[in-house]
Image (cartoon, grey):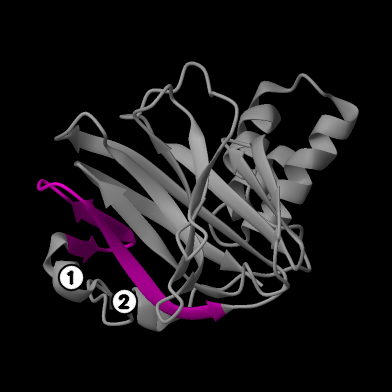
C-alpha cells in the first residue's frame, strides 16, 4: 500500500515517498502516519523536480568548499552536520561556493546547542556578495522570538516579521527561503512568516551560507533547490 511504499522509500526517494503519503491523505486526511510523514518531508520538492547540494561543499568531514575567512576554525563538519561556535562578541559567517540566480529554494534544519550571550541568533544567508558588500539573512534570535531579513549593504536595514510562538531554540527547526527574481518568501517549520520584494533586479543573486552570533548551533539537511 501507499504507506508501506512511502516508508520504504522515505530516505532513498523522498519526493516519491511524499507523493505516496499525500495520496493516503487524499483519501484519509486524518491518517496519523501520513500526516506525520508529510510534515517531516515538507521541504521535499515534488517528484520530477530536483535539488542538489554540490558534493564539494560537504564531502566526508571536509568543508573545503566553504569560506569562513578568519573565523573558519569556528566551523566544523561531521557527516552532514555543520556546527558553528561563536563565543566572542560579533557575528561569524560561513559562505559557500554556490552562486545562485533568479529562482531557487534553500532549506536547513538547525538547533541551538548553547547560548553564550543575550543577543544570540542564527540564520541562513543568501544573495551574498562579498565585493558589494550585500547580504540577506533569514534567521531566528533573541529579540521577541522574531525572524528578520537584513540587507547589509550600503542601504542597511532590518526587516522584522511576525513573532513565532512556542518555539524552543534547542529543538530542531526547519527554515526555508523561496526566491524569485522579484521577491523572497521565508518559512519556519512550514509556516510562512515573512515576504519581501526586491528593490533591485539582482538583489537576491549571490552566494548562500550560514551565520551565527553568541551561540553554538548545529545545522543539518542543508539543501539547495534550483
The percent position of residue 194, horizontal first and vertical second, equals 65, 39
Residue 170 position, x and y percent, is 30, 29
**Looking at the image, residue 18 lies above or below residue 31:** below
Against 165, is 73 above or below?
A: below
Q: Label 2 near label 1: C-beta < 8 Å?
A: yes
**Quadrant where the image shows the N terminus:** top right
- Give the residues drawn in magenta, as a range: 75-99
Q: Is residue 1 visible?
A: no
The residue indicated by pointer 1 is 72
Residue 95 forms part of the magenta stretch:
yes
Q: Nearer the viewer, residue 220 or 160?
A: 160
Q: Is residue 30 left or right of residue 168?
A: right
Residue 135 placement, left or right of 122:
right
Q: Nearer the viewer, residue 46 or 185?
A: 185
Q: Quadrant of residue 24?
A: top right
Could you classify mark 2 by the number of other residues whose Cα lies within 10 Å: few (under 14), some (14-19), or many (20 or more)? some
Q: Please name the residue shown 43% across and 21% down the image.
A: 144
**Viewer-nearest residue: 114 or 20:** 114
Q: Please say whether residue 167 is one of the residues in the magenta stretch.
A: no
Side (left or right) of 60 relative to 169: left
In the rendered image, which residue does mark 2 sit on? 66
Q: Distance between the Cα atoms at labels 1 and 2? A: 8 Å
Amino acid at each position: 500500500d501507499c504507506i508501506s511504499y512511502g516508508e520504504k522509500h522515505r530516505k532513498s526517494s523522498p519526493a516519491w515517498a511524499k507523493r505516496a503519503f499525500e495520496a493516503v491523505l487524499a483519501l484519509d486526511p486524518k491518517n496519523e502516519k501520513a500526516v506525520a510523514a508529510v510534515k517531516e518531508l515538507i521541504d521535499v520538492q515534488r517528484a520530477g523536480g530536483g535539488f542538489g547540494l554540490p558534493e564539494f561543499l560537504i564531502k566526508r568531514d571536509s568543508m573545503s568548499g566553504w569560506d569562513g575567512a578568519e573565523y573558519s576554525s569556528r566551523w566544523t563538519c561531521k557527516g552532514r552536520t555543520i556546527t558553528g561556535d561563536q563565543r566572542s562578541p560579533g557575528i561569524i559567517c560561513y559562505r559557500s561556493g554556490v552562486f545562485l540566480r533568479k529562482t531557487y529554494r534553500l532549506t536547513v534544519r538547525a538547533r541551538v546547542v548553547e547560548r553564550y550571550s543575550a543577543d544570540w541568533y542564527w540564520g541562513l544567508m543568501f544573495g551574498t556578495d562579498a565585493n558589494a558588500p550585500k547580504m540577506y539573512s533569514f534567521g531566528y534570535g533573541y529579540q521577541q522570538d522574531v525572524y528578520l531579513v537584513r540587507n547589509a549593504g550600503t542601504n542597511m536595514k532590518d526587516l522584522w516579521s511576525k513573532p513565532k510562538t512556542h518555539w524552543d531554540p534547542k529543538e530542531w527547526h526547519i527554515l526555508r527561503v523561496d526566491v524569485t527574481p522579484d521577491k523572497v518568501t521565508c518559512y519556519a517549520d512550514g509556516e510562512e512568516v515573512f515576504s519581501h520584494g526586491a528593490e533591485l533586479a539582482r538583489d537576491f543573486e549571490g552566494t548562500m551560507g550560514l551565520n551565527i552570533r553568541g551561540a553554538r548551533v548545529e545545522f543539518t539537511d542543508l539543501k539547495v533547490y534550483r
